[in-house]
Amino acid sequence: MFLLLCRSSNIYSNKSSTMKWVHPVAVTMRAMRTLSTLATLNGRNRKILFKLVGIGLGATTLTSVVTAGSNNISNLPESLYDVSDFMTEPVTPKSTLTKNKDDMKVKMELFIMKIQADFCRALENEEDPNSKFLVDRWTRSEGGGGVTCVLQNGKTFEKAGVNVSVVHGHLPADAVRQMKARGKDLGGKDLPFFAAGISSVIHPTNPHIPTIHFNYRYFEVTQENGEKMWWFGGGTDLTPYYLVEEDVKHFHSTLKQACDVHDSSYYPKFKKWCDDYFMVTHRNERRGVGGIFFDDFDKLSQDNCFKFVRSCAESVVPSYLPLVKRHKNDSYTSSQRDWQLLRRGRYVEFNLVYDRGTKFGLYTPGARIESILMSLPVYAKWEYMHSPPEGTQEAKLTEVLKNPRDWL
Amino acid sequence: MFLLLCRSSNIYSNKSSTMKWVHPVAVTMRAMRTLSTLATLNGRNRKILFKLVGIGLGATTLTSVVTAGSNNISNLPESLYDVSDFMTEPVTPKSTLTKNKDDMKVKMELFIMKIQADFCRALENEEDPNSKFLVDRWTRSEGGGGVTCVLQNGKTFEKAGVNVSVVHGHLPADAVRQMKARGKDLGGKDLPFFAAGISSVIHPTNPHIPTIHFNYRYFEVTQENGEKMWWFGGGTDLTPYYLVEEDVKHFHSTLKQACDVHDSSYYPKFKKWCDDYFMVTHRNERRGVGGIFFDDFDKLSQDNCFKFVRSCAESVVPSYLPLVKRHKNDSYTSSQRDWQLLRRGRYVEFNLVYDRGTKFGLYTPGARIESILMSLPVYAKWEYMHSPPEGTQEAKLTEVLKNPRDWL
């Protein structure tokens, strides 16, 4: 946990698969991290730690380290996260994070920052070396802020957005309504709330690579009677333009494995929920071939709920990256590109008409619109009465969107 | 009114500015129309009429003519409409139209069929001769139907949609909610309703021609206590990509003239309503440079309300066509095209997130989605954090969208 206190820099952890230039100071810091990790895992040797950290960091930081180091954090595996691996500094000030390190708000923020970094780097590895994520760290005047990472017009990814937001304040009536629709009757309006989430949509250039979306979030709302409610929500879903059954099976089975570790009833339940949620009602078709989706997840202990969410979010890279690698160099025709754009039009329809996350964002005052709407593709197309001819690959996809299948 | 009874054919009225091939039978029919118009205007000579109509039409039609001809229709100027000028036959069966010719439902249907034809033909005149409107006549199993005219990928118009719908049945709760938001508390759900309207969006190819939208509609709802409510609504608004003040002034002054004939308070009131309605709240900008917009229009007699709506709808062609003619051959750059597509992205955002007409459609069971969403452009674009540099023409437009002006 106290590693949070290291400032964000161009240091990459040794988990990275590529060799990167490392600044001499970084080497010192990495050595410290290794040592301090050992120290905290043992819950001992605080004095050694102080000394080592003292070499690299200033006095203020040292004070914070003392605070952090004086607690037992062995039950917080996320303390192992290397904040210097994050795309930028976390949203919440370090002092607050340190003081509240056992709070789920903090655990979730650190976790989604790590997932953001891991996913962005995995995508960058599939890109032209010149295409890197633009990192925008923003604050919300009403409380909190976020980190939006966008890669646009890359060779592999036409638009890739990975957004972390950690916001708090009071929830307005319109946003409450969006929550109520999820089965949460909050009994009043303008309630104090906290929301931390990661949300991502990747629109690849090549029509043979599916679009992926995932979103994992943690909510707290203080009710009128002062009682605090919390819950998790999230999901990962795939939107192919052409149906490759092997890809869809790989995707679903990776998600299933992540679910099964926790409860074998989760995958079938959340797979169905996903098919139901990503429904473009006015077209009578799903947005894609589904995945998993859940909300109001609060039946286990808070830590066990969090563990499940972590498993799901950590399965994003292994579920999707093999598909990117497999298809990024596939050839395609202009009519296949056209079909991709038409399907992206449907994606826009879902996001703007139905998606509760988007609506929640649009109705939350001070929300950062560019971060919410980064889910929209660069280009989308609409053609009056377009319908793929029977027997084509395009019709084959449409059939699956109308009649979702069990893939495993 | 009984001219409705003539079957739709390839006959164009002598009001058309271009010479068209006319079938010999059509000549006979035109002669009959002229005569029969005279006859009905005089409210006499029914015998002569029978005879003439009898030459061209069958016995069933003849019977209907008798019914129609036996009423005084001198208070129905729309009886002068030549149904053979319509893009296709009206939605409602002729017998019903004839029987209920004094009913506002019938008057409105005939009027919007005529406006559709006039507007489509005016647009076709600006097109390559090979680009013609596709005419789709559709029925709604729950009651009613419509006529959708679309011209796609033309030389002047990338997408032009002009839709007439005449629907009835029971209004579901979700649709009632959309109406309630308009200040109509209908006090219940699943109420019998009737709606007739024309709706059109024109997305030109050239970024120097603005997009236009207009919509004029008539509603009837029977309340739980059996009382029937009726009202009109509508508006015309302009969405330029580049600001040409002269164009905007011409557009607004044409609308103002149409309003002023009825009440000089209408234009300022409905101009403001338009600016307020076409607000993309999450972007804090208007969709375009406005026009007029009104709803719940029911304070005058039904006929006087209708007269106002007719003036508005009839001002569409003179407000817009001069702009098309002026700019259709302007040269433009690829970056100007790009800006047009980005602005079309915003158009999509408004239509899918806020537009009540679209929502009303999406929530009405059996609604024809392709007719509702024909308002969406062929292509739209989204770019993360796009903002035109200060001092550019693009920034000048953005300024006006953020701060609506009085144009006259």
Image (cartoon, coloured by chain):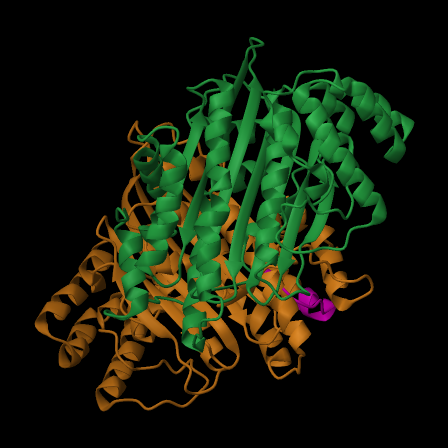
Chain colours: A orange, B green
| Residue A359 picture location, percent across and down | 43, 46
Q: Is residue A334 left or right of residue A167?
A: right
Q: Residue at x 70, y 50 (%)?
A: B135
Task: Relative to B339, say whether B220 is above or below.
Answer: above
| Residue A377 picture location, percent across and down | 50, 65
* Number of dots carrying numbers: 0
Outermost residue, left side: A59
Q: Which region of the structure is painted magenta?
A: A233-250
Quarter-of-image position of residue B170? top right
Q: Residue at x 65, y 77 (%)?
A: A334
Q: Is residue B373 visible?
A: no
Work out whether residue B298 or residue B251 is closer to the camera in this orientation and state it. B251
Work out whether residue A30 or residue A94 is closer to the camera in this orientation and state it. A94
Outermost residue, right side: B59
Q: Residue at x 69, y 65 (%)?
A: B130
Q: Is residue B248 left or right of residue A65?
A: right
Quarter-of-image position of residue B141? top right
- Residue B341 within the magenta-colored segment of the rendering: no
Task: Relative to B101, say whether A214 is above or below.
Answer: below
| Residue B160 picture location, percent across and down | 58, 55
- Which quadrant is home to the N terminus of chain B? top right
- Residue A249 within the magenta-colored segment of the rendering: yes
Task: Relative to B183, say whether A267 is above or below.
Answer: below
Q: Residue at x 57, y 53 (%)?
A: B122
Work out whether residue B407 or residue B21 is closer to the camera in this orientation and state it. B21
Outermost residue, top side: B225
Q: Is residue B4 visible?
A: yes
Task: Relative to B71, say whether B95 is above or below.
Answer: below
| Residue A38 picture location, percent across and down | 32, 74
